[in-house]
Amino acid sequence: MGVARNIILKVAYDGADYHGWQIQPGKKTIQGRLTEAVRSLCDSNATIRGASRTDAGVSALGQVALAVLDTPIPTGNLAGALNDRLPPDITILQAEDAPADFDLSTGVTSKLYRYTIFTGPVRPVLKIRHCWHLPLKLDVEAMTEAAGILVGTKDFKSFASAADNRENSVRTILRCDLTSDGDWIYINVEGDGFLYNMVRNIVGTLTEVRRGRWKPEKITEIIEAKNRRAAGPIAPAGGLCLMWIKY
């Protein structure tokens, strides 16, 4: 046996048919498929960890994974070789060597998630698995004002799932903005880290900030409550995509 190497994998996937990133017994997961591919290719003892545990139905264009491999295969050939063993809805974009002390979690400086909403009256059937069809006239200006209130270092407990039991719910949102293109609305949330379901709860809350509903200043009240029941409903998983992770 040789010396195991740390390999960083940049991964993209369509999460619509998966039970999230993390391996779960008897369920189809992204981590599970990647592990199977790596072990069949080069190392039966290989382990793979992801920088973000995306939920069931969530996709990614820039997930980062760390594989510890004992293989003679050159790093430059790994992406192509693994892609030959992966299903069409998962692909390795890049493989590169990582230093022995590389830390997949604490080295992260920021992550960007994008949520896609379609507000037209007719379902976009070819894209429906990757958006939230919300046929309403949304007040984008008010939603943008509300999104700006989320920026900064705050206690986001009100936007965490009830299943998130972490003691520290303080996170820093570096950016939360909206762009629109006709009936399509894109909500971009960049932060140093996120609580469980945090982005989807933010999106669901922002959609309540529309004409006849909550005003933008309601966001401050929700943050101060530190209670999940104070915020809006959770947005469906399919509209969420992990765009990139920076180190």
Image (spheres, grey):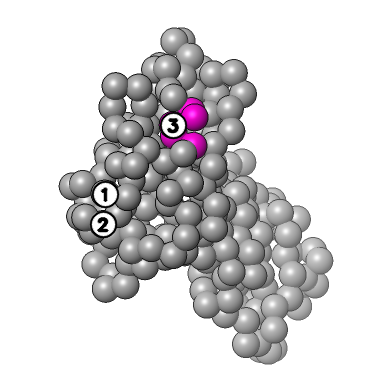
Residue depicted at x 64% and y 64%: 246
What type of secondary structure mainly makes up the magenta span? helix
- The residue labelled by disc 2 is 224
Residue depicted at x 52% and y 77%: 106
Front-lying residue, 80 or 236 = 236
Q: How many marks?
A: 3
Please provide percent x and percent y for residue 207.
37, 32
Residue depicted at x 73% and y 75%: 97
Q: Is residue 143 magenta?
A: yes
- What amino acid is found at the position of numbered circle 2 in the picture? Glu
- The residue labelled by disc 3 is 142
Q: Is residue 17 magenta?
A: no
Are the residues flagged by discs 2 and 1 in contact, CB closer than 8 Å?
yes
Q: Quadrant of residue 103?
A: bottom right
Callout 3: helix, strand or loop?
A: helix
**Furthest-top residue in view?**
122
Q: Which circle's residue, 3 or 1, is located before the other in the chain? A: 3
Query: How many angstroms separate mark 2 from mark 1 (CA)?
Result: 5 Å
- What amino acid is found at the position of numbered circle 1 in the picture? Glu
Magenta-highlighted residues: 140-144
Locate the N terminus by quadrant.
bottom right
- The residue labelled by disc 1 is 221
Residue depicted at x 54% and y 18%: 183
- What amino acid is found at the position of numbered circle 3 in the picture? Ala
| Residue 127 to residue 109: above or below | above
Q: Is residue 110 left or right of 21 when viewed as pictured?
A: right
